[in-house]
Image (cartoon, rainbow, N blue to C red):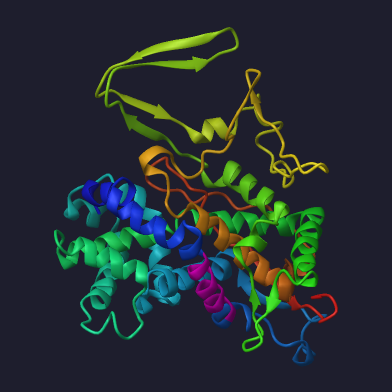
Amino acid sequence: FDDRFAKIVSEATIGHSIMERHILKSDGLSSCLREFQKCLCQRFVANAAPPREADGGLVNGWSRVGGILEFFGSALWVASAEVIFGCPPLANEEGFRLALSFDSCLPTLTQISSKTMQQILCKEGFKAREIMVEKFKRVLSNEQRYDNGTISELTKEIDQTYSHFMTLDQRSRLFGLLIIASFFNTVPTTFWVVYHILSDTEAYDAVCKEVLSLLRDKKIHKDGVNNEVDFSLSDLDTTPVLDSIISEALRLHTVNSVMRPRIATEDFELKLPAREGKLQFQVKKGEMVIASPTLAHRDKDVFKEPLSFQWDRFLPGENGVSPIFLQNGRQLRDPLCSFGGGSSLCPGRKFSLAEIKVVVGLMIAEYDMRFIGGITPDPPEYLRTKTPRSFGMPASDVAFELRRRSSSKAG
Protein backbone atom coordinates (compact mmCIF):
# COMPACT_ATOMS: atom_id res chain seq x y z
CA PHE A 1 0.00 0.00 0.00
CA ASP A 2 1.40 3.39 -0.92
CA ASP A 3 0.31 7.01 -0.83
CA ARG A 4 -1.96 6.55 -3.87
CA PHE A 5 -4.19 4.13 -2.03
CA ALA A 6 -4.07 6.07 1.24
CA LYS A 7 -5.30 9.11 -0.65
CA ILE A 8 -8.07 7.16 -2.37
CA VAL A 9 -9.29 5.77 0.95
CA SER A 10 -9.06 8.87 3.10
CA GLU A 11 -9.63 11.82 0.77
CA ALA A 12 -11.19 10.77 -2.56
CA THR A 13 -14.67 12.23 -2.84
CA ILE A 14 -16.01 9.26 -4.77
CA GLY A 15 -14.77 6.66 -2.30
CA HIS A 16 -16.02 8.64 0.66
CA SER A 17 -19.47 9.13 -0.81
CA ILE A 18 -19.82 5.39 -1.51
CA MET A 19 -18.78 4.38 2.00
CA GLU A 20 -20.94 7.08 3.59
CA ARG A 21 -23.97 5.83 1.67
CA HIS A 22 -23.47 2.26 2.92
CA ILE A 23 -22.16 2.62 6.48
CA LEU A 24 -22.80 6.21 7.60
CA LYS A 25 -26.28 7.24 6.45
CA SER A 26 -29.20 5.72 8.32
CA ASP A 27 -30.70 3.43 5.66
CA GLY A 28 -27.41 1.84 4.65
CA LEU A 29 -26.14 1.69 8.22
CA SER A 30 -29.35 0.02 9.48
CA SER A 31 -29.17 -2.63 6.78
CA CYS A 32 -25.50 -3.40 7.45
CA LEU A 33 -26.11 -3.48 11.19
CA ARG A 34 -28.90 -6.08 10.90
CA GLU A 35 -26.77 -8.45 8.84
CA PHE A 36 -23.76 -7.78 11.04
CA GLN A 37 -25.70 -8.83 14.16
CA LYS A 38 -27.01 -11.99 12.50
CA CYS A 39 -23.46 -13.02 11.69
CA LEU A 40 -22.25 -12.28 15.23
CA CYS A 41 -25.12 -14.21 16.80
CA GLN A 42 -24.84 -17.24 14.57
CA ARG A 43 -21.07 -17.58 14.51
CA PHE A 44 -20.02 -16.36 17.96
CA VAL A 45 -22.64 -15.38 20.52
CA ALA A 46 -24.94 -18.41 20.32
CA ASN A 47 -22.23 -20.97 21.08
CA ALA A 48 -19.82 -18.96 23.20
CA ALA A 49 -20.65 -21.06 26.28
CA PRO A 50 -22.57 -24.31 26.90
CA PRO A 51 -26.33 -24.21 27.56
CA ARG A 52 -27.21 -23.94 31.26
CA GLU A 53 -28.70 -27.43 31.30
CA ALA A 54 -25.40 -28.85 30.02
CA ASP A 55 -22.99 -26.97 32.29
CA GLY A 56 -22.96 -29.41 35.18
CA GLY A 57 -19.23 -30.09 34.75
CA LEU A 58 -18.28 -26.44 34.94
CA VAL A 59 -17.31 -24.54 38.07
CA ASN A 60 -20.55 -22.81 39.10
CA GLY A 61 -21.52 -22.70 35.44
CA TRP A 62 -18.56 -20.56 34.36
CA SER A 63 -16.86 -21.46 31.07
CA ARG A 64 -13.49 -20.11 29.92
CA VAL A 65 -13.69 -18.93 26.31
CA GLY A 66 -10.21 -17.55 25.73
CA GLY A 67 -9.02 -13.95 25.68
CA ILE A 68 -10.88 -10.68 25.19
CA LEU A 69 -8.86 -9.81 22.08
CA GLU A 70 -9.15 -13.30 20.66
CA PHE A 71 -12.92 -13.59 21.12
CA PHE A 72 -14.20 -10.05 20.51
CA GLY A 73 -11.52 -9.20 17.94
CA SER A 74 -12.13 -12.28 15.82
CA ALA A 75 -15.90 -11.77 16.09
CA LEU A 76 -15.68 -8.22 14.73
CA TRP A 77 -13.19 -9.24 12.05
CA VAL A 78 -15.22 -12.19 10.77
CA ALA A 79 -18.49 -10.23 10.71
CA SER A 80 -16.82 -7.32 8.89
CA ALA A 81 -15.11 -9.56 6.32
CA GLU A 82 -18.31 -11.48 5.65
CA VAL A 83 -20.97 -8.77 5.81
CA ILE A 84 -19.32 -5.42 5.06
CA PHE A 85 -16.72 -6.56 2.52
CA GLY A 86 -18.25 -9.82 1.28
CA CYS A 87 -14.93 -11.67 1.37
CA PRO A 88 -15.61 -15.19 2.72
CA PRO A 89 -11.98 -16.34 2.27
CA LEU A 90 -11.00 -13.85 5.01
CA ALA A 91 -14.01 -14.38 7.28
CA ASN A 92 -12.33 -16.96 9.51
CA GLU A 93 -9.67 -17.46 12.20
CA GLU A 94 -6.87 -17.45 9.61
CA GLY A 95 -8.06 -14.06 8.33
CA PHE A 96 -8.03 -12.66 11.87
CA ARG A 97 -4.43 -13.87 12.38
CA LEU A 98 -3.42 -12.29 9.09
CA ALA A 99 -5.03 -9.01 10.18
CA LEU A 100 -3.16 -9.03 13.50
CA SER A 101 0.15 -9.66 11.72
CA PHE A 102 -0.46 -7.00 9.08
CA ASP A 103 -1.72 -4.49 11.65
CA SER A 104 1.42 -4.86 13.78
CA CYS A 105 3.54 -3.73 10.81
CA LEU A 106 1.11 -1.30 9.18
CA PRO A 107 2.82 1.94 10.34
CA THR A 108 6.16 0.74 8.98
CA LEU A 109 4.77 -0.63 5.71
CA THR A 110 3.00 2.64 4.90
CA GLN A 111 6.25 4.58 5.25
CA ILE A 112 8.38 2.36 2.98
CA SER A 113 7.75 2.43 -0.79
CA SER A 114 10.16 -0.37 -1.74
CA LYS A 115 8.56 -3.80 -1.63
CA THR A 116 11.99 -5.34 -1.16
CA MET A 117 12.65 -3.26 1.95
CA GLN A 118 9.12 -3.92 3.22
CA GLN A 119 9.77 -7.65 2.97
CA ILE A 120 13.11 -7.35 4.74
CA LEU A 121 11.95 -5.11 7.59
CA CYS A 122 8.43 -6.55 8.05
CA LYS A 123 8.60 -10.11 6.78
CA GLU A 124 5.53 -11.47 8.56
CA GLY A 125 3.41 -8.35 8.06
CA PHE A 126 4.39 -8.19 4.38
CA LYS A 127 3.49 -11.86 3.91
CA ALA A 128 0.14 -11.40 5.66
CA ARG A 129 -0.72 -8.42 3.48
CA GLU A 130 0.06 -10.28 0.25
CA ILE A 131 -2.09 -13.25 1.31
CA MET A 132 -4.97 -10.87 2.08
CA VAL A 133 -4.55 -9.24 -1.34
CA GLU A 134 -4.65 -12.64 -3.07
CA LYS A 135 -7.84 -13.58 -1.24
CA PHE A 136 -9.52 -10.35 -2.38
CA LYS A 137 -8.36 -11.08 -5.93
CA ARG A 138 -10.16 -14.41 -5.81
CA VAL A 139 -13.38 -12.70 -4.80
CA LEU A 140 -13.15 -9.76 -7.20
CA SER A 141 -12.19 -11.93 -10.19
CA ASN A 142 -15.08 -14.37 -9.69
CA GLU A 143 -17.39 -13.89 -12.67
CA GLN A 144 -20.39 -14.93 -10.58
CA ARG A 145 -19.53 -12.67 -7.63
CA TYR A 146 -22.43 -10.24 -8.17
CA ASP A 147 -25.01 -12.98 -8.57
CA ASN A 148 -24.20 -15.54 -5.87
CA GLY A 149 -24.42 -13.19 -2.87
CA THR A 150 -20.80 -13.58 -1.75
CA ILE A 151 -19.91 -9.95 -2.34
CA SER A 152 -21.36 -7.02 -0.44
CA GLU A 153 -23.06 -4.04 -2.06
CA LEU A 154 -20.31 -1.78 -0.69
CA THR A 155 -17.54 -3.85 -2.26
CA LYS A 156 -19.51 -4.25 -5.47
CA GLU A 157 -19.98 -0.49 -5.93
CA ILE A 158 -16.40 0.43 -5.05
CA ASP A 159 -15.03 -2.31 -7.32
CA GLN A 160 -17.19 -1.24 -10.25
CA THR A 161 -16.33 2.43 -9.74
CA TYR A 162 -12.56 1.97 -9.53
CA SER A 163 -12.29 -0.76 -12.18
CA HIS A 164 -12.26 1.99 -14.84
CA PHE A 165 -8.83 3.24 -13.78
CA MET A 166 -7.33 0.62 -11.45
CA THR A 167 -6.07 -2.90 -12.15
CA LEU A 168 -7.34 -5.96 -10.29
CA ASP A 169 -4.18 -5.99 -8.19
CA GLN A 170 -4.59 -2.32 -7.28
CA ARG A 171 -8.27 -2.76 -6.37
CA SER A 172 -7.42 -5.80 -4.24
CA ARG A 173 -4.79 -3.77 -2.39
CA LEU A 174 -7.31 -0.99 -1.92
CA PHE A 175 -9.76 -3.40 -0.31
CA GLY A 176 -6.97 -4.82 1.82
CA LEU A 177 -6.34 -1.33 3.13
CA LEU A 178 -10.05 -0.64 3.62
CA ILE A 179 -10.64 -3.78 5.66
CA ILE A 180 -7.57 -3.23 7.85
CA ALA A 181 -8.74 0.38 8.37
CA SER A 182 -11.94 -1.07 9.85
CA PHE A 183 -9.81 -3.18 12.17
CA PHE A 184 -6.95 -1.18 13.68
CA ASN A 185 -9.13 1.28 15.62
CA THR A 186 -12.23 -0.76 16.41
CA VAL A 187 -10.63 -3.97 17.67
CA PRO A 188 -8.27 -2.44 20.28
CA THR A 189 -11.03 -0.05 21.39
CA THR A 190 -13.35 -3.02 21.95
CA PHE A 191 -10.64 -4.81 23.92
CA TRP A 192 -10.23 -1.87 26.32
CA VAL A 193 -13.99 -1.32 26.61
CA VAL A 194 -14.51 -4.93 27.72
CA TYR A 195 -11.42 -4.90 29.93
CA HIS A 196 -12.60 -1.83 31.85
CA ILE A 197 -16.20 -3.05 32.09
CA LEU A 198 -14.97 -6.26 33.73
CA SER A 199 -12.46 -4.36 35.90
CA ASP A 200 -15.02 -2.17 37.62
CA THR A 201 -18.05 -3.67 39.36
CA GLU A 202 -19.92 -0.38 39.20
CA ALA A 203 -19.29 -0.05 35.46
CA TYR A 204 -20.27 -3.69 34.85
CA ASP A 205 -23.52 -3.32 36.79
CA ALA A 206 -24.36 -0.08 34.98
CA VAL A 207 -23.82 -1.68 31.54
CA CYS A 208 -25.85 -4.76 32.48
CA LYS A 209 -28.69 -2.59 33.79
CA GLU A 210 -28.67 -0.54 30.60
CA VAL A 211 -28.70 -3.50 28.21
CA LEU A 212 -31.13 -5.68 30.17
CA SER A 213 -33.50 -2.74 30.65
CA LEU A 214 -33.67 -2.42 26.87
CA LEU A 215 -34.61 -6.08 26.69
CA ARG A 216 -37.30 -5.72 29.33
CA ASP A 217 -38.72 -2.61 27.70
CA LYS A 218 -38.88 -4.53 24.40
CA LYS A 219 -36.86 -1.91 22.61
CA ILE A 220 -34.73 -4.89 21.73
CA HIS A 221 -36.66 -7.99 20.71
CA LYS A 222 -35.97 -11.64 20.14
CA ASP A 223 -36.28 -12.57 16.48
CA GLY A 224 -39.10 -15.11 16.22
CA VAL A 225 -37.21 -17.33 13.77
CA ASN A 226 -33.67 -17.34 15.10
CA ASN A 227 -34.30 -16.20 18.70
CA GLU A 228 -31.54 -13.61 18.23
CA VAL A 229 -31.30 -10.25 19.95
CA ASP A 230 -31.75 -7.44 17.46
CA PHE A 231 -30.45 -3.93 18.21
CA SER A 232 -31.79 -1.07 16.10
CA LEU A 233 -30.07 2.28 15.59
CA SER A 234 -32.66 3.88 17.87
CA ASP A 235 -31.76 1.34 20.59
CA LEU A 236 -28.11 2.26 20.29
CA ASP A 237 -29.00 5.93 20.74
CA THR A 238 -30.25 5.15 24.25
CA THR A 239 -27.05 3.67 25.72
CA PRO A 240 -25.32 6.55 27.55
CA VAL A 241 -23.29 4.21 29.78
CA LEU A 242 -21.79 2.35 26.83
CA ASP A 243 -21.28 5.69 25.06
CA SER A 244 -19.28 7.01 28.01
CA ILE A 245 -17.11 3.89 28.36
CA ILE A 246 -16.35 3.82 24.63
CA SER A 247 -15.48 7.54 24.63
CA GLU A 248 -13.14 7.06 27.57
CA ALA A 249 -11.46 4.09 25.85
CA LEU A 250 -10.99 6.19 22.72
CA ARG A 251 -9.60 9.06 24.78
CA LEU A 252 -7.09 7.11 26.83
CA HIS A 253 -6.18 4.06 24.75
CA THR A 254 -7.08 4.14 21.06
CA VAL A 255 -5.08 7.26 20.20
CA ASN A 256 -2.31 6.26 22.60
CA SER A 257 0.45 7.66 20.40
CA VAL A 258 -0.84 9.50 17.35
CA MET A 259 0.34 12.55 15.45
CA ARG A 260 -1.81 14.11 12.74
CA PRO A 261 0.21 15.97 10.06
CA ARG A 262 -1.46 18.37 7.63
CA ILE A 263 0.03 20.33 4.72
CA ALA A 264 -1.07 23.97 4.41
CA THR A 265 -2.74 24.65 1.06
CA GLU A 266 -2.39 28.43 1.46
CA ASP A 267 -0.80 31.02 3.74
CA PHE A 268 -2.70 31.60 6.97
CA GLU A 269 -2.34 32.76 10.55
CA LEU A 270 -2.65 30.08 13.22
CA LYS A 271 -4.00 31.31 16.54
CA LEU A 272 -3.66 29.06 19.56
CA PRO A 273 -5.27 29.79 22.94
CA ALA A 274 -2.86 30.32 25.85
CA ARG A 275 -3.25 31.19 29.49
CA GLU A 276 -2.57 34.83 28.74
CA GLY A 277 -4.17 35.70 25.44
CA LYS A 278 -3.28 33.87 22.23
CA LEU A 279 -0.15 32.71 20.47
CA GLN A 280 0.00 33.56 16.77
CA PHE A 281 2.00 31.76 14.09
CA GLN A 282 2.39 32.58 10.41
CA VAL A 283 2.06 29.39 8.36
CA LYS A 284 3.17 29.40 4.73
CA LYS A 285 1.66 27.36 1.91
CA GLY A 286 3.32 23.95 1.73
CA GLU A 287 4.44 23.92 5.36
CA MET A 288 3.43 21.06 7.63
CA VAL A 289 1.36 21.54 10.75
CA ILE A 290 1.29 18.65 13.21
CA ALA A 291 -1.43 18.18 15.82
CA SER A 292 -1.46 15.50 18.49
CA PRO A 293 -4.80 14.04 19.62
CA THR A 294 -2.78 12.09 22.20
CA LEU A 295 -1.61 15.24 23.95
CA ALA A 296 -5.05 16.83 23.65
CA HIS A 297 -6.65 13.80 25.31
CA ARG A 298 -4.20 14.02 28.22
CA ASP A 299 -4.56 17.73 28.88
CA LYS A 300 -5.02 18.03 32.66
CA ASP A 301 -6.68 21.40 32.21
CA VAL A 302 -9.45 19.69 30.25
CA PHE A 303 -9.68 16.25 31.86
CA LYS A 304 -9.42 15.69 35.60
CA GLU A 305 -6.83 12.98 36.32
CA PRO A 306 -6.28 12.47 32.58
CA LEU A 307 -4.16 9.32 32.90
CA SER A 308 -6.82 7.40 34.84
CA PHE A 309 -9.72 5.55 33.21
CA GLN A 310 -13.03 6.92 34.49
CA TRP A 311 -15.90 4.99 32.94
CA ASP A 312 -18.46 7.71 33.75
CA ARG A 313 -16.35 10.67 32.60
CA PHE A 314 -18.64 11.34 29.61
CA LEU A 315 -21.88 10.21 31.27
CA PRO A 316 -24.70 12.79 31.22
CA GLY A 317 -25.90 14.07 34.59
CA GLU A 318 -29.27 13.30 36.15
CA ASN A 319 -30.76 16.14 34.13
CA GLY A 320 -29.58 14.42 30.91
CA VAL A 321 -27.10 17.18 30.08
CA SER A 322 -23.71 16.03 28.82
CA PRO A 323 -20.65 17.11 30.81
CA ILE A 324 -18.85 20.26 29.72
CA PHE A 325 -15.11 20.31 29.07
CA LEU A 326 -13.28 23.63 29.21
CA GLN A 327 -9.92 24.78 27.94
CA ASN A 328 -8.66 28.19 29.02
CA GLY A 329 -12.18 29.07 30.10
CA ARG A 330 -13.75 28.18 26.75
CA GLN A 331 -16.07 25.25 26.17
CA LEU A 332 -14.72 22.62 23.78
CA ARG A 333 -17.22 21.70 21.10
CA ASP A 334 -15.70 18.22 20.76
CA PRO A 335 -13.17 17.18 23.40
CA LEU A 336 -12.34 13.94 21.54
CA CYS A 337 -10.38 13.70 18.29
CA SER A 338 -10.71 9.99 17.52
CA PHE A 339 -11.73 9.71 13.88
CA GLY A 340 -9.67 12.28 12.03
CA GLY A 341 -11.11 15.47 10.63
CA GLY A 342 -11.81 17.47 7.50
CA SER A 343 -11.67 15.56 4.22
CA SER A 344 -10.08 12.57 5.98
CA LEU A 345 -12.85 12.24 8.61
CA CYS A 346 -13.43 8.50 8.88
CA PRO A 347 -16.57 7.53 6.90
CA GLY A 348 -16.94 4.42 9.07
CA ARG A 349 -17.06 6.27 12.39
CA LYS A 350 -20.75 5.65 13.09
CA PHE A 351 -20.56 2.00 12.17
CA SER A 352 -17.42 1.55 14.26
CA LEU A 353 -19.19 2.83 17.37
CA ALA A 354 -22.31 0.82 16.54
CA GLU A 355 -20.46 -2.47 16.13
CA ILE A 356 -18.68 -2.04 19.48
CA LYS A 357 -22.02 -1.44 21.21
CA VAL A 358 -23.60 -4.36 19.38
CA VAL A 359 -20.96 -6.97 20.17
CA VAL A 360 -20.79 -5.93 23.85
CA GLY A 361 -24.58 -5.66 24.11
CA LEU A 362 -25.19 -9.06 22.52
CA MET A 363 -22.82 -10.73 24.95
CA ILE A 364 -24.24 -8.92 27.99
CA ALA A 365 -27.76 -9.89 26.90
CA GLU A 366 -26.88 -13.59 26.85
CA TYR A 367 -24.08 -14.02 29.40
CA ASP A 368 -22.60 -12.99 32.71
CA MET A 369 -18.92 -12.18 32.12
CA ARG A 370 -15.91 -11.91 34.42
CA PHE A 371 -12.15 -12.36 34.49
CA ILE A 372 -10.97 -15.87 35.35
CA GLY A 373 -11.99 -16.63 38.92
CA GLY A 374 -13.31 -13.09 39.29
CA ILE A 375 -9.75 -11.76 39.77
CA THR A 376 -8.88 -8.58 37.85
CA PRO A 377 -5.47 -8.80 36.15
CA ASP A 378 -3.19 -5.84 35.52
CA PRO A 379 -3.83 -4.12 32.19
CA PRO A 380 -1.47 -5.31 29.45
CA GLU A 381 1.08 -3.01 27.86
CA TYR A 382 0.54 -1.68 24.36
CA LEU A 383 1.92 -3.56 21.40
CA ARG A 384 5.27 -2.09 20.40
CA THR A 385 5.81 -1.36 16.71
CA LYS A 386 8.80 -0.07 14.77
CA THR A 387 7.26 3.40 14.68
CA PRO A 388 6.02 5.51 17.62
CA ARG A 389 2.41 5.42 16.40
CA SER A 390 0.01 3.29 18.43
CA PHE A 391 -3.75 2.75 18.31
CA GLY A 392 -3.83 0.97 21.64
CA MET A 393 -3.51 -2.64 20.49
CA PRO A 394 -2.61 -4.70 23.59
CA ALA A 395 0.68 -6.62 23.55
CA SER A 396 -0.97 -9.58 25.28
CA ASP A 397 -4.47 -10.91 25.76
CA VAL A 398 -6.51 -11.18 28.97
CA ALA A 399 -8.57 -14.33 29.60
CA PHE A 400 -12.21 -14.17 30.68
CA GLU A 401 -15.08 -16.55 31.28
CA LEU A 402 -18.81 -16.69 30.66
CA ARG A 403 -21.96 -18.06 32.24
CA ARG A 404 -25.29 -18.11 30.49
CA ARG A 405 -27.90 -15.85 32.01
CA SER A 406 -31.09 -17.39 33.32
CA SER A 407 -34.21 -16.43 31.40
CA SER A 408 -35.41 -14.38 34.38
CA LYS A 409 -32.26 -12.25 34.40
CA ALA A 410 -32.38 -11.75 30.64
CA GLY A 411 -35.80 -10.19 30.94
Please state the horizontal and vertical placement of residue 325, each as a whole percent of the image. Answer: 67, 30
Image quadrant in which you'd find residue 297: top right
Give percent across and percent down for residue 338.
51, 43
**Residue closest to the far front:** 27
Q: Residue furthest bottom?
A: 54
Front in this rendered view, residue 91 or 102? 91
Q: Is residue 196 magenta?
A: no
Give the farthest residue toward the right: 408
Task: Write the residue at 64% across / 45% down.
Answer: 248
Q: Is residue 60 left or right of residue 81?
A: right
In the rendered structure, which segment of residues is drawn in magenta? 30-41
Assign the N terminus to one quadrant of the image: bottom left
Image: 230 above or below 114: below
| Whole-percent x, y for residue 50 in the image | 70, 86
Q: Is 36 a magenta residue?
A: yes
Q: Residue at x 45, y 15 (%)?
A: 271
Report the side of 74 relative to 238 (left or right).
Answer: left
Q: Residue at x 55, y 78 (%)?
A: 38
Q: Is residue 97 left or right of residue 190?
A: left
